[in-house]
Image (cartoon, rainbow, N blue to C red):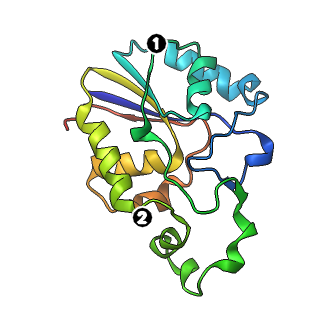
Amino acid sequence: MNLYLLRHTSVEKKYQKCYNGSFDVDIDLDFIKTQKFIDRKKELEKIDFDSIYSSKLQRSIKTLEHLDYINFIQTPLINEVSFKFEGQNFNDFKHLAPPNAMSSTKNWCDFILNESIDNFRARAKSFLDSLNGKNILICSHLGAIAMMLSIIQKRDFYEVFDEAVKIEYLDLIKINSLKL
């Protein structure tokens, strides 16, 4: 099985650099005119996908629609993790954090998440366990992609997330010959 993990396109400007999580924000329509979007679309057109999945959030759904996919499965199992301060800028609530919150990714997640890591992992694992086919495209979110990668690679989520923060909008991660 070959998995293609696609981070959704950029969100509306007013929601960039915000914790959006399960907050359903729209995409930045200017981004779909960029060379990155055009190139990604051409790259994906060359692959015959057995199945395509999207989170239930508009930023993933609309990304796939603008890539001209119409037959895809929407599932909440790959929605982004839920945050306590959804839709708010990263810096708007740092003053509320306990003193040790910034000392590690785990401590920050303990402060900011509205959903437990165990629940987040369980739904991502349930999704991955259900997959079948040769080529599968998954359009989701930074945190959800990091969680899927941590499960696939059998690595600590926080460690993978620290690496995953470099994943930009519309980046594609290919995982070849995966056996779940």
Q: Nearer the viewer, residue 23 or 158?
A: 23
Residue to which mark 2 is pinned: 158
Give me the residue at 19% from left, 35% from top: 179
Give me the residue at 80% from left, 46% from top: 14
Quarter of the image with the C terminus is: top left
Within-10-Å neighbours for mark 1: few <14, some 14–19, many 20+: few
Rendering coords of residue 37 (x, y %): 66, 25
Q: CA distance from mark 1 to mark 2?
A: 33 Å
Disc number placed over residue 71 in the picture, else none:
1
Relative to 67, say whether 54 is above or below: below
Q: Is residue 155 shown left or right of residue 88?
A: left
Disc number placed over residue 25 in the picture, else none:
none
Q: Amino acid at mark 2?
A: Tyr
Rendering coords of residue 140 (x, y %): 50, 37
Relative to 164, say whether 30 is above or below: above
Q: Secondary structure at mark 1?
A: loop
Q: Amino acid at mark 1?
A: Asn
Q: Is residue 160 shown left or right of residue 127?
A: right
Rendering coords of residue 163 (x, y %): 48, 57
First in residue order: circle 1 vs circle 2: 1
Where residue 127 sits, quadrant-wise, is: top left
Give me the residue at 39% from left, 51% from top: 147
